[in-house]
Amino acid sequence: MNYEISQTFFFDAAHTLRREIEADSSRRVHGHTYHAEVMLSGQPDVATGMVVDLGLVRRAIEQLRPMLDHRMLDDIAGLGPATLENLCAFIWRELLPALPALAAVRVWRTGVGDSCTLRR
C-alpha cells in the first residue's frame, strides 16, 4: 500500500494565449484564479508516521507561490505559453528539488471548469 498526501494553494494571474478557438478573447490580457494541488506519495516514516511533513510542503509552496501570484504569466521565464499543462510542468520542476516524493500536480480553474493533472 502506498499513501498519498496533498496540499492545495491558489494564485491569481494574468496572461494571453494564442489559440484557434475563442481566439479573440484569449489574445487579450485576461486573468484567472488558479488552484493547484501537489500530491506526494510513499510510505510513512516509522519514527514520524508521515510520508512527508506537511510543514515542509507548505514551505516549498510558499517559496513558489510568489513566482506566480499576481504575475503576468507570459513574462515568467521557463513557463512557455500559459496553458494548464505548462503550469503543471512549471510547478513540478520548481517543487521537485525540495519535494522528491512529488507524485502529481493538478492545476484547475473553477470559474471555467477545466483542469490538468501531471503524474509521475
Image (cartoon, rainbow, N blue to C red):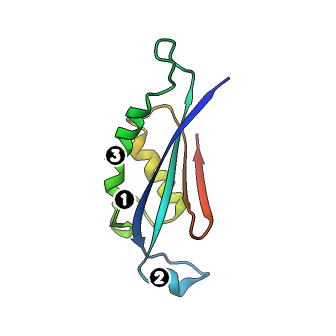
Q: Earlier in the sequence, mark 1 or mark 2?
A: 2
**Residue 51 % position (x, y):** 51, 25
Q: Amino acid at mark 2?
A: Arg
Query: Residue furthest toward the top?
Result: 47
Q: Earlier in the sequence, mark 3 or mark 1?
A: 3
Q: Quadrant of the C terminus?
A: top right
**Residue 109 % position (x, y):** 55, 64
Q: Which residue is mark 1?
A: 68
**Crowdedness near tag 1: few (<14), some (14–19) or many (≥20) residues, C-alpha within 10 Å:** some
Closer to the observer: label 1 or label 2? Answer: 1
**Crowdedness near tag 3: few (<14), some (14–19) or many (≥20) residues, C-alpha within 10 Å:** few
Query: Residue furthest toward the right?
Result: 1
Q: Earlier in the sequence, mark 2 or mark 3?
A: 2
Q: Identify which residue is drawn at 41% across, 42% down.
A: 95
Instruction: Answer with the quarter of the image where residue 12 lies.
Output: bottom left
- Could you tell me which secondary element the residue under label 2 belongs to? helix
Q: Identify which residue is drawn at 48% across, 61% down.
A: 34
- Above or below — where is 52 with respect to 65? above
Q: Amino acid at mark 1?
A: Leu
Q: Amino acid at mark 3?
A: Glu
- Above or below — where is 104 with respect to 112? above
Q: Which residue is mark 2?
A: 27
Q: Which residue is mark 3?
A: 62
Q: Identify which residue is drawn at 57% across, 21% down.
A: 43
- Could you tell me which secondary element the residue under label 3 belongs to? helix
Q: Quadrant of the N terminus?
A: top right
